[in-house]
Every structure is written in structure tokens, then in C-alpha cells.
Image (cartoon, helix red, strand yellow):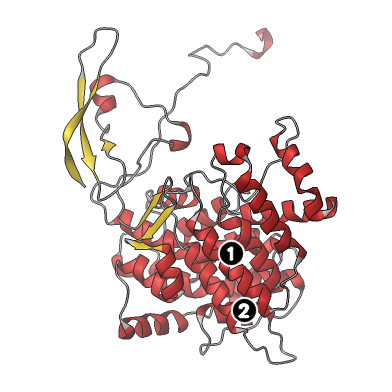
């Protein structure tokens, strides 16, 4: 970042002297006012619930322009990456800052492939959960437990340790996700196959069984790979901020990523695609396409408590660029599986059309987001709704790692310590229990 030509001046109505703060300019995006010395100079804090107007870090990884509906990974538009690259190339880009050439891609992919196995005792760890445990509960525990199995890469301040833990996390995440799924359905675990692609390996570990061979459908494989790319990183969202905050304490990389998995579990974050699919299923039960008008009226009624899931976004005030790409994959998957007449997809298309033409939603800039279609794709593939957020966590792991590594390398980084506006009781004395 560089200093802007202007400075920000804070003035007070009580006659206190004005305070000047430096203004910094990034490559693109809004300028930021540097208020780090605000408390020292004024004895005051800023108040910004939800960090809506606060830049908590300097980053060169992902950029979002919500008004334009633009998403860039290291400067590359998400549309180009999702069309021309695979997930391994995207991982390399996020971790190292540039797209790999063929040799670099091959070396990186081989490194990931050779670390897909997990310690055999982790199977015993999984068996400690109830069979009906939520996959995200299992996954949170498994990722955190990696620090107990891989002691040689737990020093977050050691660059080599961070590199080793990064490869291990990216490589083993599909194995852990598949283990959680297989445990839920009561089937034996399937070992990873080194000859398969990253997405193909997950499909094999989830849906193969020892009784017969499993052939990966290339259309499904490509769609799943695209899901991974679209979810790989998304700037300073709740789970990424959690990973950074957790990592700022110096905890090991596995613990920091486990914290991100736990945060992602929230229905307002990683569970949004599950909520969108549930909404479509509920409309289908109501009567399908013919009942969309009635459902839209319920959404508009503030007293109904009904929300339009899969529309709108905390950052995007335009069409989520990932949603268009996900819609393409949705059509390809349904066509390949002979599900072109899938009632939920037809319902989704009709709902999207009506919502985009309704002034109520247009004025509020409630456009479809990536969750609106990703749930339909995963459902068609055969992934149960309870696994949706686990798939999201698998994809986002590389982004979390890149953000964590960037933070550790920032000379200005400190342990996170938000402040507060205290509204509780002022100091008071304890009265003996007999006199209370």
C-alpha cells in the first residue's frame, strides 16, 4: 500500500483539537484511513459492529468488487480461472501468487497426491463419534486432531512447517471428508487412489465400495472441480477472519484451520447452500412452480419470517459471478445424468426469473448467489445436504492457508484484540450473602 495524497481529519464538536490520520491507497478498491494511533491520541475507539467499514489487514490474495459483481484471485477473474484452469492450478496460484507452468503444476499435483493418506489411527478417532454425528462435527475434530498426529509441522512461525502443513491439509482434506461421510452411512472407508484427479479422488472415496469398481463420471468430476475453484477463497469473510484471528495467537496451522471449519459450519456462512436447497424443496411441497407467486408474497411480508435463501450477499450488490458459472455446471450435470427435467432445477430457474423481474428484489439488489445453484449440483451428484458444508470447507482450506501464511509474513501483524463499547455495570461492591 502507499500513502494517498490526502489525509483524514477528525474534528470534535467539544472544541478538542483536530486529529489527522494517514490515508492509504491499495492497488484497487477503497482507500483506508489508518486509525492505529486513534486511542493513543484521543483515548477513544471506533465502533463498527460486524466490521462493515473496517479493513483488518493488508492482503494481496483476493479482491471483490461487490457493486460490479467482480471476484479476482491474485488479479485473475474467477470466470477465466473456472473456465481455463483446474483446482490444482488455482491452489498453486493462491499459495504462491502466480499460475504454474506445466512442470510446476505436475510437481505440485504429485506432492499433493503423495500426501492423501491419513494416519491409520485417525480411523479409531472417527469411531469415537456417534454414527449420526453431523459431518461438520466430525470434520472439525479431525482437522484439529491432525496436530496430534503430525508433530513435525506445528510451528506456525517456521516457514518450512507452514509449507508442509499446507500440503498435508490440502491433500488430506478430501480423505477426511470422505471418512466422515462413510462413517455416517456405515460403509467401509475407501483409500485414496493416486492415479485420480483431486475431485475424482473425492468422488471415488465417497461413492466407491469394495464390492465393485467405481468409474468417475468426467462431467461430474469437472463440476466438482469447479465448485472447489469457486469456493477456494473469498476475501476477509467470517471463517477467513477466524483463521487469521486464531493464527495470530501463534497456535499451530491445524488448529487455526479447524477454527475456520467450525466458523464455516454456521448457517449464515457455509450452510447457505443447504438452506437454499431446503427452501426449494419446501416450495416444491407447496405445489412447485405454480406456488412461486404465493411464496414471493410471503417473503415480502415482514411478519411471515420467510426468507428468500440463495439470493443477496453481504458483499455483492450485483449478480454473484460465481452463480453464473455454477448455473452452467448445473445444466451440464443434470444433462449428463438425464435429469434435465429435474423439478427442483426448473423451480430454481422459474424462481430466479420472477425474483429478477420483481421491483421488490431489484431495488434491494437481491441477485442469486453461488449457493442458489451449488446445492442442486451436489444433490444431483448424490452428495447429501449434511455434507454440503464439508465440501465447502474442503475447497476453502487452500484460501485459509494462503491467508494465514500471508498474515504471518506481515511485519505489522499482531495478535488480534478487538475492543468494545462497554454498557454493563460500573464498579460496585460485593455485599455479604446474608445482606443481599
Tell me if residue 162 comes above or below residue 192 in the rendering: above
**Residue 361 position within the rendered picture, expressed as x and y whole percent measured from the top left:** 60, 40
**Residue 198 position within the rendered picture, expressed as x and y whole percent measured from the top left:** 51, 79
**Residue 127 visible to an observer of this rendering:** no
Q: Residue furthest left?
A: 5
**Residue 400 position within the rendered picture, expressed as x and y whole percent measured from the top left:** 43, 59
Mark identifier at residue 327 = 1
**Residue 58 position within the rendered picture, expressed as x and y whole percent measured from the top left:** 29, 48
Mark identifier at residue 203 = 2
Discs 1/2, front: 1
**Residue 347 visible to an observer of this rendering:** yes
Distance between the alpha carbons at the discs numbered 1 and 2:
21 Å
Local packing at callout 2 (Cα closer than 10 Å; few below 14, some 14-19, many 20+) is: many
| Foreground residue among 170 and 227 | 227
Q: Quadrant of residue 294?
A: top right
Instruction: Tell me what residue is drawn at x 31 percent, y 44 percent.
Output: 414
Q: In what element is the residue under mark 2?
A: helix
Mark identifier at residue 393 = none
Tell me if residue 197 comes above or below residue 332 in the rendering: below
Q: In what element is the residue under mark 1?
A: helix
Instruction: Tell me what residue is drawn at x 27 percent, y 57 percent.
Output: 409
| Foreground residue among 169 and 392 | 392
Q: Earlier in the sequence, mark 1 or mark 2?
A: 2
| Foreground residue among 231 and 183 | 231
| In this picture, residue 121 sits left or right of residue 21 | right
Q: Quadrant of residue 165?
A: bottom left
Amino acid at each position: 500500500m502507499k500513502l494517498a495524497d490526502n489525509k483524514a481529519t477528525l474534528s470534535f464538536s467539544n472544541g478538542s483539537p483536530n486529529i489527522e490520520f494517514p490515508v492509504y491507497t491499495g492497488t484497487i478498491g477503497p482507500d483506508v484511513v489508518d486509525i492505529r494511533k486513534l486511542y493513543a491520541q484521543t483515548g477513544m475507539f471506533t465502533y463498527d459492529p460486524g466490521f462493515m467499514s473496517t479493513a483488518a489487514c493488508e492482503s494481496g490474495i483476493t479482491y471483490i468488487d461487490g457493486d460490479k459483481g467482480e471476484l479476482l484471485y491474485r488479479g485473475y477473474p474467477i470466470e477465466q480461472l473456472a473456465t481455463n484452469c483446474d483446482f490444482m492450478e488455482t491452489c498453486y496460484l493462491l499459495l504462491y501468487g502466480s499460475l504454474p507452468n506445466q512442470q510446476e503444476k505436475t510437481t505440485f499435483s504429485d506432492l499433493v497426491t503423495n500426501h492423501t493418506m491419513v494416519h491409520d489411527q485417525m480411523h479409531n478417532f472417527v469411531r469415537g463419534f456417534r454414527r449420526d454425528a453431523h459431518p461438520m462435527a466430525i470434520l472439525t475434530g479431525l482437522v484439529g486432531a491432525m496436530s496430534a498426529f503430525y508433530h513435525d509441522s506445528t510451528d506456525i512461525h517456521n516457514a518450512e512447517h507452514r509449507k508442509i502443513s499446507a500440503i498435508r491439509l490440502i491433500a488430506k482434506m478430501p480423505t477426511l471428508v470422505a471418512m466422515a461421510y462413510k462413517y455416517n452411512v456405515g460403509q467401509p472407508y475407501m483409500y485414496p487412489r493416486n492415479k485420480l484427479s483431486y475431485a475424482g479422488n473425492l468422488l471415488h472415496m465417497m461413492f466407491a465400495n469394495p464390492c465393485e469398481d467405481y468409474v468417475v463420471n468426467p462431467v461430474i468430476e469437472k463440476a466438482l472441480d469447479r465448485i472447489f475453484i469457486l469456493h477456494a477463497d473469498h476475501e476477509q469473510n467470517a471463517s477467513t477472519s477466524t483463521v487469521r484471528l486464531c493464527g495470530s495467537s501463534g497456535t499451530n496451522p491445524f488448529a487455526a484451520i479447524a477454527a475456520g471449519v467450525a466458523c464455516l459450519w454456521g448457517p449464515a456462512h457455509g450452510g447457505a447452500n443447504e438452506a437454499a436447497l431446503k427452501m426449494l424443496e419446501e416450495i416444491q411441497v407447496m405445489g412447485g412452480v405454480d406456488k412461486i407467486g404465493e411464496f414471493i408474497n410471503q417473503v415480502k411480508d415482514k411478519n411471515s419470517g420467510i426468507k428468500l435463501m440463495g439470493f443477496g450477499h453481504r458483499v455483492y450488490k450485483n449478480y454473484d459471478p460465481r452463480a453464473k458459472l455454477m448455473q452452467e455446471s448445473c445444466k451440464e450435470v443434470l444433462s449428463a445424468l438425464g435429469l434435465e427435467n429435474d423439478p427442483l432445477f426448473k423451480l430454481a430457474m422459474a424462481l430466479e426469473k420472477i425474483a429478477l423481474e420483481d421491483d421488490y428484489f431489484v431495488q434491494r439488489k437481491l441477485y442469486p448467489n453461488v449457493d442458489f445453484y451449488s446445492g442442486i449440483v451436489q444433490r444431483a451428484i448424490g452428495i447429501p445436504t449434511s455434507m454440503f458444508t464439508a465440501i465447502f470447507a474442503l475447497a476453502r482450506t487452500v484460501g485459509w492457508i494462503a491467508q494465514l501464511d500471508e498474515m504471518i509474513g506481515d511485519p505489522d501483524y499482531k495478535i488480534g484484540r478487538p475492543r468494545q463499547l462497554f454498557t454493563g455495570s460500573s464498579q460496585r461492591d460485593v455485599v455479604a450473602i446474608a445482606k443481599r
